[in-house]
Image (cartoon, rainbow, N blue to C red):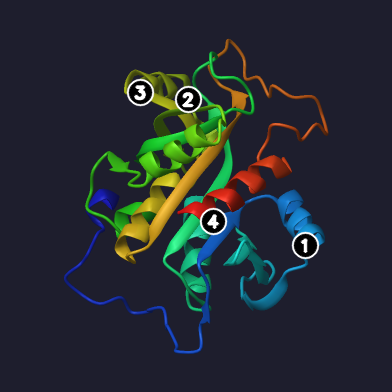
Amino acid sequence: MIINSFDNKSESKINPKYGEDRWKCDVCIITFSYVIEQYVLSKFNPQKIGEISVVTAPIPVYKFEYKSKTIVFYKTYMGASAAVGCLEDVMQLIDVKKIVVFGGSGCLDKEIARGKVIVPTFAYRDEGTSYHYAMPKDYIKIKNSDAVANFMLNHNIPYIEGKTWTTDSFYRETINNMNARKAEGCISVEMECSAFQAVCDFRNLDLFFFLTSGDLLDAPEWDTRRVENDLSGTQHDSFHFDIALELACEI
């Protein structure tokens, strides 16, 4: 069974290669948003330091300086397997220990406003990738959630903490599964959090993860909670990159 896939007794057939010529940086920020990527390119004029080869298209990796910190930035693909694979590849280009990730999520609680920051505390592992990086358990602890929550509190950014449900298939977020996750305390659903934490634990990296509350599942019918082309309060909102950048400077 997939939950028994974690093997720490034998070597992988393919392993990352960490050369001595990797770019040294303080923090790596990861987004899923093409809008945020364009925002960073236009505002910070970053230097392209390399790219990773992906069959669909190469992913460029950028570096810029901010408040005496060297920040590396790239846009990843959606989904646990793709996002973790990209991180493994990028880590062969850069020498860094701190990873900041932010993205969007579906909301499982109608009381949580659209656009509100969510700080995951645990992630339900309804994806396949994490079971190759961590021993099988239903939930994985998001280790630095307290640090992220304290940052939000100290900067007067409204936020809420809670469990998240990481799934591989957003078209199969069934009513019964949603109700089961809600009963366990999940307030959001997304596609990467549990896998990011698993790979960061395995590779001895520090993950700092937050989400923005988007579409609503906790309703009689699915509610996008935004009008077409309105990006405010979504993961495409540049305000959320600004949060990630300031967080990167304080961790």
Who comes first in sequence, dot 2 or dot 4? 2
Amino acid type, label 4? Cys
Amino acid type, label 1? Leu
The residue lying furthest to the top in this view is 220
Find out whether the residues at labels 2 and 4 contact each other: C-beta distance under 8 Å: no
Residue 78, can we see it? no
Marks 3 and 2: which is nearer the front?
3
User: Disc 2 designates what residue?
Assistant: 174
User: Disc 4 designates what residue?
Assistant: 249
Who comes first in sequence, dot 1 or dot 2? 1
Marks 3 and 4: which is nearer the front?
4
Towards the viewer: 199 or 210: 210
Q: CA distance from mark 2 to mark 4?
A: 39 Å
| 33, above or below 108, in the image | below
Towards the viewer: 165 or 112: 112
Give me the disc on residue 162: none
User: Disc 3 designates what residue?
Assistant: 185
Q: CA distance from mark 3 to mark 4?
A: 31 Å
Q: Residue at x 35, y 21 (%)?
A: 180
Q: CA distance from mark 1 to mark 2?
A: 39 Å
Left or right of 40: which side holds 195? Answer: left
Find out whether the residues at labels 3 and 2 contact each other: C-beta distance under 8 Å: no
Q: Residue at x 63, y 51 (%)?
A: 32
Amino acid type, label 2? Thr
User: Disc 1 designates what residue?
Assistant: 41
Left or right of 4: which side holds 141? Answer: right
Amino acid type, label 3? Gly
